[in-house]
Amino acid sequence: MTEFFLVLALAILLGWPLGRYLSAVMRGTPTPGDRLFNRIERPLYRLMGTHPRAGMSWRGYAGAFLLSNLVLAAFVWLVLVTQAWLPFNPDAVPNMRWDLALHTMVSFLTNTNQQHYAGQAQLSYFAHMTAIVALQVITPMMGLALVVATLRTLCDGRGPLPAQEEKAPGTAVDVGNYWVDVLRPTLRVMLPLCLLWSVLLTSQGVPATLAGGPVVAPVDVSVAMTEQKIPLGPVAPMVALKQLGTNGGGWYGPNSATPLENPTPLSNLLETLGLILLPVSVIFMIAGLTGRRRFAALVFGTMLTMSVASGAFAIWSEGSSSTAQDIALMEGKEVRFGAAASALWSALTTQTSNGSVNAMLDSAAPLTGLAAMANMLINAIWGGIGSGLQQFLVYLMLAVFLAGLMTGRTPELFGRKIEAPEVKLLALLVLLQPLVVLGFTAITLGLPSLAGTSNPGFHAISQVFYEYASAFANNGSGLEGLGDNSVWWNTTGSIALVAGRYPALIVPLLIAAMLARKRPAPEDSGSLQIETPTFACVLIAVILILTLLQFLPVLVLGPVADHLTLIAH
């Protein structure tokens, strides 16, 4: 627990000033380094055909988001299926199969980084740098842009669009400029921070080279092979991006469980801190962006409470539960870091939709797996950069509506009523998750030839359910041992990835635009007060009911039954 509180303390200590800087960047107010960054940004704005002060409606903003994703999707898929013929391929990596390339493209496009391949063996340096790493830089900032636009809209945006002379009910609100909202934090926050993290990781021994890997003799002379090629590459920059950008996809198949990605205790601390640094900073950004400090405190307090509870349960499960000492659970554990550090990482990587690992989750205690599944089903305990807060706003609006009904108060958010049209859209988002995750899980388990599970019984249910829950949550982690590189897994996984990403980002923006068209009502004694500890407790209860209870049967049949089986034996 000491390391857990150390990581949280460092994240809060660094996240507070970073969040204030991030709010200034997203508001376009003067910041240090403007002279340098403005010179870089101006030609890029001209290239994109936009102006920093040009506004967009919510439709224009969402349309630009989808257009940019379509262009990137086509480019990345083509790179993956032609990488054998492209430069920077010293290890002669072949082209990807179409379905694997599809899943890989969608996975990284949705900021998920779910990998059905081994990066060191199935991707060239060129594919890593131009396709994978490029998406790891841009897609987190896309999520940030969408949540910033949603918050702006809830707070009246940047005013009416230029074509409208004065604000009136029903007019379209200027939600911002999508291209600016993606470019500014990419250049001013993400890239400088990743450069710093990359240098720190390189100092700890993480490789950073374009040379081919060396060929060495195996240490164990009794093995059949006489030589082994050690795969290297520009690993440190990608590891920095995968941690800081809630990406999760590593250079190597074992991810940060291998010493080449995570060689020392200090590198492990840096990478663990990187899991939550920017998600925490985004929460601190709310105060400066909206001017509502008490609302930012509500969000932070609620997320922190759920994070501590989830993390403490995972650490207890891995270190002190009745199955913690089972020798079967040691396979896949990184003994350099110990059970507590492995459990902490598994908790934070699923709280933040990161998905990277420093020990194989398939080897975790069943109740640790239960904690990881619960984190992904909630998907708003810190969450991905931007996307986690966007999902939190969905729960918040539902909690406002339900609390208003229970107390007889008007269900209002920032002075605007939440009514039937908004609630129907919120219900659609809540129902989409079980329809996709449970639907695909049932079909896959019903057709064993498709499942590719390596374990019989209850653990097989966990493997399949976890894969789809991870895809829908845009997390990317998985229970290894699943034969997921097949046409079935690649195509259905891609559908789950898309279903979990785009509605969750766009629908809240639509709802915010619907609320912005309504005439604001002044707060009085009849208004529901949401910036209180009491409402925070109600909000946590709503989150648990809407997510965990509807998945309770599969959680009992999976990790809970797995836990009881280990106890019985």
Image: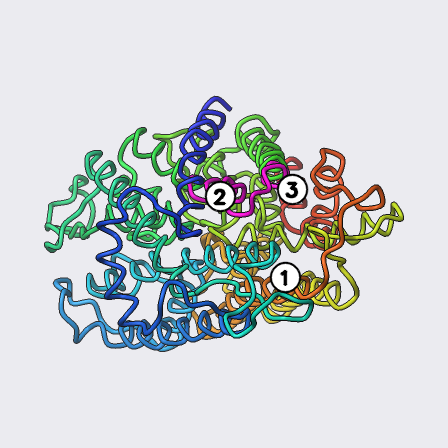
Q: Which residue is mark 2?
A: 285
SS at mark 3? helix
| Residue type at numbered disc 1 | Ala
Res. 196 in view: yes
The residue lying toward the viewer, choosing from 62 and 566, is 62
Quarter residue 507 falls in: bottom right
Which amino acid is tagged 3?
A: Thr
Residue situated furthest right in the rendering: 408
Q: Is residue 119 above or below residue 254?
A: below
Disc 1: CA contacts within 10 A as few (<14), some (14-19) or many (>=20): many
Q: Residue 286 at what x, y percent from top left? A: 53, 44
- The residue pinned by badge 1 equals 512
Do the numbered discs 2 and 3 sit on residues whose CB atoms are within 8 Å? no
Magenta stretch holds residue 112: no
> Which contiguous range is marked in magenta?
277-299
Left or right position of 65 against 46? right
Q: Nearer the viewer, residue 249 or 43?
A: 43
Q: Earlier in the sequence, mark 2 or mark 1?
A: 2
Image coords of residue 482 (percent x, y): 47, 58
- Label 2 element class: helix
Q: Secondary structure at mark 1?
A: helix
> Mark on residue 565?
3
Task: Please tell me which of labels 2 and 3 falls first in the chain.
Answer: 2
Q: Is residue 66 left or right of residue 544?
A: left
- Above or below, 45 against 342 in this view is below
Could you tell me how many numbered marks the image carries? 3
Q: How many angstroms separate mark 1 from mark 3 (CA)?
A: 47 Å
Q: CA distance from mark 2 to mark 1?
A: 18 Å
CA gap between label 2 and label 3 equals 46 Å
Between discs 1 and 3, the one toward the N terminus:
1
